Image (cartoon, grey):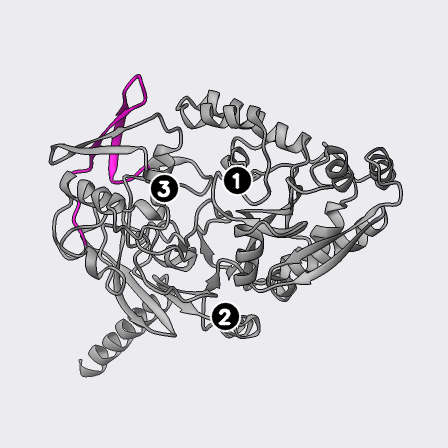
């Protein structure tokens, strides 16, 4: 009997061990390039903050999905007044913050009163300037009153800058963030990692993951080794020049998508000869996007012909507005009074895509008679010279803010484009909430700035993720900043 009992126990132990070994993992370790300076997205501009906390720890009244569309968040529904000046939100019941305190309309009011306060340090405070009042109707109903219609209001409520915080914990969110999301903050090992754990009483659908670590690895070689050794399970944006290591490896999946980073040859439209449309058209005809994309992004950038993200439903493909045609470029320069071309400067910030693109573009434009002097600058100097003082001829930069076509309606913006038609269209767009009308208006603006060759439109920065082949549910695109965990799961 003793032998039989021992055998049964041994078999049971073996079965348990086998079951445990076969069980799907529920934890993930994600490599990210930058450590956030703090963990409160409502009080800091660094993208690295949202990478960790957006839709994980913190949530807004709305949320942005992986296609850039607005979805319900802490608000289960809303109604908009006919004049577009009032938004009434119905909030989910039974929601709690990670410290156990309840969420209700008073927290919404507190969040936006804090965001709009005179001493607010919110990086995107200007986006919420139309808000004139936030009124608590009852614990689960809150109303926003606007000074003017704002077609991006629901989208902006879904950004990391507008996540809901509680008065009990807001002051400590920089180091000990407390939100309503599916994951709660566990620990921050400075210089190493941030660890999140699944929040048991979460009000929505529970994620598959029970724990997530964001591991800070700034060096490409170190990130590569960590992936190959299994020290991390993936990264959302890996250096494209090293992707070949993983593309043929069955242990990994490479996800290539787009970001909100419109990469442009920015042009000083207020300065001769770039104030001449024919000169700008000549530059556009002189750019071979395919060669630029291959050389600067290792083939992973997505060509653009206007200032809009290709993954957005409003996007128009205008890449053929001025196709690569050196002969046409030379003819336009001659018509503009520059039969022998001219010389100009190209200021390049310290990022690989800009420096590499600059070398290629200098070679391409030299073939049509435009001789460029490449000037490498650090970010502080770029911000002062280009963005603030407008002291430049040409520069290369990625504009990473979502839905930022409105910059073309600001003649004081650094590239100095002044078009009254675009300004009027943008004003109408900002005041329009109907999706079909918004799409048409956005399309008109895209078409005009492409036709006017305001800037040289090059490519959308790619998001190139490398992940364990057994993981699924990661966002291929980055319509907003963040590595959203809610749908990530192990498949085996």
- Looking at the rendering, in which quadrant would you find the C terminus? bottom left
Q: Name the mark nearer the viewer: 1 or 3.
A: 1
Secondary-structure class at tag 3: helix
Q: Which mark is residue 63?
A: none
Question: Contact, CB < 8 Å: mark 1 with mark 3?
Answer: no
Earlier-in-chain disc, 1 versus 2 = 2
Earlier-in-chain disc, 3 versus 2 = 3
Left or right relative to 451: residue 216: left
Q: Name the mark nearer the viewer: 3 or 2.
A: 3
**Range of the magenta residues?**
72-97
The reply to whether the magenta stretch includes residue 112 is: no
Q: Please state the horizontal and vertical placement of residue 459, each as a whole percent of the image.
A: 64, 46
Marks 1/3: CA–CA distance:
16 Å
Secondary-structure class at tag 1: loop
The residue where tag 1 is placed is 412
Left or right relative to 451: residue 161: left
The residue where tag 2 is placed is 218
Q: Please state the horizontal and vertical placement of residue 203, each as a whole percent of the image.
A: 21, 45
Marks 1/2: CA–CA distance:
36 Å
The residue lying at 33 percent from left, 49 percent from top is: 55
Q: Please state the horizontal and vertical placement of residue 108, each as a whole percent of the image.
A: 20, 41
**Would you call the spot at circle 1 few (<14 residues within 10 Å), some (14-19), or many (20 or more)?**
some
Q: Picture quarter containing residue 26?
A: bottom left
Count every numbered label the image shows and give the total: 3
Secondary-structure class at tag 2: loop
The reply to whether the magenta stretch includes residue 75 is: yes
The residue where tag 3 is placed is 126
Earlier-in-chain disc, 1 versus 3 = 3
**Would you call the spot at circle 3 few (<14 residues within 10 Å), some (14-19), or many (20 or more)?**
few
Q: Is residue 3 above or below residue 305?
A: below
Q: Is residue 193 above or below residue 362?
A: below
Q: Is residue 362 visible?
A: yes
């Amino acid at each position: 009997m003793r032998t039989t009992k021992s055998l049964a126990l041994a078999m049971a132990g073996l079965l348990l061990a086998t079951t445990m070994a076969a069980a799907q993992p529920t934890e993930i370790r994600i490599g990210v390039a930058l450590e956030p300076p703090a963990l409160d997205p409502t009080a800091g501009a660094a993208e690295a903050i949202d990478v960790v906390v957006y839709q994980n720890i913190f949530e807004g009244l709305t949320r942005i999905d992986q296609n850039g569309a607005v979805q319900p968040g802490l608000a289960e529904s809303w109604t908009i007044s006919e004049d577009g000046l009032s938004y009434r939100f119905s909030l989910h019941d039974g929601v709690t913050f990670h410290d156990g305190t309840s969420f209700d309309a008073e927290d919404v009011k507190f969040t936006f009163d804090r965001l709009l306060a005179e001493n607010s340090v919110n990086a995107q405070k200007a986006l919420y300037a139309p808000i004139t009042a936030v009124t608590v109707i009852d614990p689960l109903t809150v109303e926003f009153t606007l000074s003017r219609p704002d077609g991006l209001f629901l989208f902006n409520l879904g950004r990391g800058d507008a996540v809901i915080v509680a008065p009990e914990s807001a002051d400590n969110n920089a180091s000990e963030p407390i939100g309503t999301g599916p994951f709660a903050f566990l620990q921050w090992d400075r210089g190493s990692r941030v660890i999140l754990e699944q929040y048991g009483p979460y009000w929505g659908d529970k994620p598959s993951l029970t724990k997530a670590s964001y591991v800070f690895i700034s060096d490409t070689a170190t990130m590569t080794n960590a992936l190959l050794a299994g020290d991390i399970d993936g990264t959302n944006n890996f250096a494209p020049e090293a992707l070949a290591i993983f593309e043929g490896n069955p242990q990994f999946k490479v996800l290539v998508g787009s970001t909100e980073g419109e990469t442009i040859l920015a042009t000083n439209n207020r300065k001769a000869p770039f104030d001449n449309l024919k000169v700008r058209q000549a530059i556009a005809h002189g750019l071979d996007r395919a060669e630029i994309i291959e050389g600067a992004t290792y083939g992973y950038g997505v060509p653009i012909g206007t200032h809009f993200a290709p993954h957005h439903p409003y996007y128009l493909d205008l890449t053929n507005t001025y196709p690569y045609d050196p002969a046409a470029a030379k003819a336009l320069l001659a018509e503009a009074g520059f039969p022998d071309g001219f010389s100009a400067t190209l200021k390049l910030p310290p990022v690989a895509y800009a420096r590499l693109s600059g070398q290629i573009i200098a070679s391409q434009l030299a073939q049509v008679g435009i001789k460029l002097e490449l000037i490498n600058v650090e970010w502080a100097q770029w911000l002062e010279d280009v963005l603030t003082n407008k002291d430049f001829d040409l520069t290369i930069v990625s504009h990473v803010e979502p839905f930022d076509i409105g910059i073309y309606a600001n003649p004081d913006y650094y590239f100095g484009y002044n078009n009254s038609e675009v300004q009027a269209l943008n004003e109408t767009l900002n005041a329009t909430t109907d999706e079909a009308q918004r799409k048409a208006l956005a399309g008109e603006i895209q078409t005009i700035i492409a036709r006017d060759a305001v800037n040289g439109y090059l490519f959308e920065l790619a998001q190139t993720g490398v992940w364990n082949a057994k993981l699924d549910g990661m966002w291929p695109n980055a319509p907003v900043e963040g590595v959203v965990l809610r749908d990530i799961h192990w498949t085996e």
